[in-house]
């Protein structure tokens, strides 16, 4: 059984036993951080009924940062998570300083020591975007192939849990 299969089994068991969604999603976030290595911080944002991004599980991001990004509207020209939610595609920003999509928001992650990020949409059974799985880096870089594959698997598990 692969590590992603093990996390899937654990997450589905937690969900079936009635654990809060935030706790189940936090297990997925922790696995993504482990795969991404030192200095990576992951976050799951969920689209609410109004179509706005809300915190699903971001155990290592400070509350003031989460408050600042709370209720972002999906927009293909804004950040990584808002862009991924709008387009349904992976969005990669190796450097906040050089990406125009971060012009309005770059001060927020830079203040926390992050230099880049990427985001994968969480897509449900009906091909609807349910949220995003974001990863912040403390250095300029793109996700490695193993990270991309792992987060893709974890995003599928997140979709399963979100949709019940």
Image (cartoon, grey):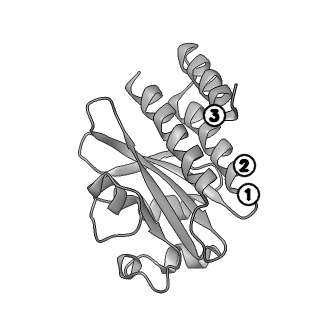
Determine whether, in the image, residue 92 is placed left or right of residue 126: right
Disc 1 on helix, strand or loop? loop
Image disc number at residue 13 = none
Q: List the single residue furthest toward the right.
A: 38
- State the separation of the CA atoms marked 1 and 2: 5 Å
53 versus 48 height, above or below: below
Disc 3 secondary structure class = helix
Residue situated in front as seen by the camera: 99 or 15: 99
Residues under numbered marks 1 and 2 in contact, where contact means CB atoms less than 8 Å apart: yes
Query: Dot 2: what SS?
Result: helix
Q: Is residue 14 left or right of residue 35?
A: left
Mark 3 and mark 2 residues within 8 Å of each other at the beta carbon = no
Answer whether residue 163 is visible to the viewer in this image. Answer: yes
Dot label at residue 4 = 3
> Which residue is disc 2 drawn over?
34
119 vs 92: above or below: above
Q: Are dots 3 and 1 in contact, CB under 8 Å?
A: no
Q: On the rendered structure, is 162 left or right of 144?
A: left
Separation of marks 3 and 1 at Cα, in angstroms:
16 Å
Looking at the image, which residue is at 30% across and 51% down? Answer: 52
Residue 60 image point, x, y percent: 65, 54
N-terminal of the pair, mark 3 or mark 2, is 3
Identify residue for label 1: 37
Give percent across and percent down for residue 138: 66, 72
Question: Residue 41: where, in percent of width, then height?
Answer: 64, 58
Residue drawn at 62 percent across, 21 percent down: 9
Q: Residues within 10 Å of mark 2 (few under 14, many from 20)?
A: some
Q: Dot 3: few (<14), some (14–19), or many (≥20) neighbours within 10 Å?
A: some
């Amino acid at each position: 059984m692969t590590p992603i299969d093990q996390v899937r089994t654990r997450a589905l068991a937690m969900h079936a036993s009635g654990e809060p969604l935030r706790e189940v999603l936090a297990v997925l976030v922790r696995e993504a951080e482990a795969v991404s290595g030192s200095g990576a911080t992951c976050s799951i944002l969920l689209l609410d009924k109004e179509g706005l991004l809300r915190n699903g599980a971001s155990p290592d991001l400070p509350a003031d940062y989460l408050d600042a990004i709370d209720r972002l509207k999906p927009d293909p020209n804004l950040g990584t998570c808002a862009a991924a939610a709008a387009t349904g595609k992976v969005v990669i920003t190796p450097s906040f300083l050089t990406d125009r999509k971060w012009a309005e928001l770059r001060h927020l992650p830079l203040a926390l020591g992050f230099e880049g990020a990427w985001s994968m949409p969480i897509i449900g059974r009906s091909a609807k975007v349910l949220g995003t799985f974001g990863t912040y880096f403390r250095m300029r870089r793109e996700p490695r192939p193993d990270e991309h594959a792992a987060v893709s698997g974890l995003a599928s598990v997140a979709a399963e849990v979100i949709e019940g």
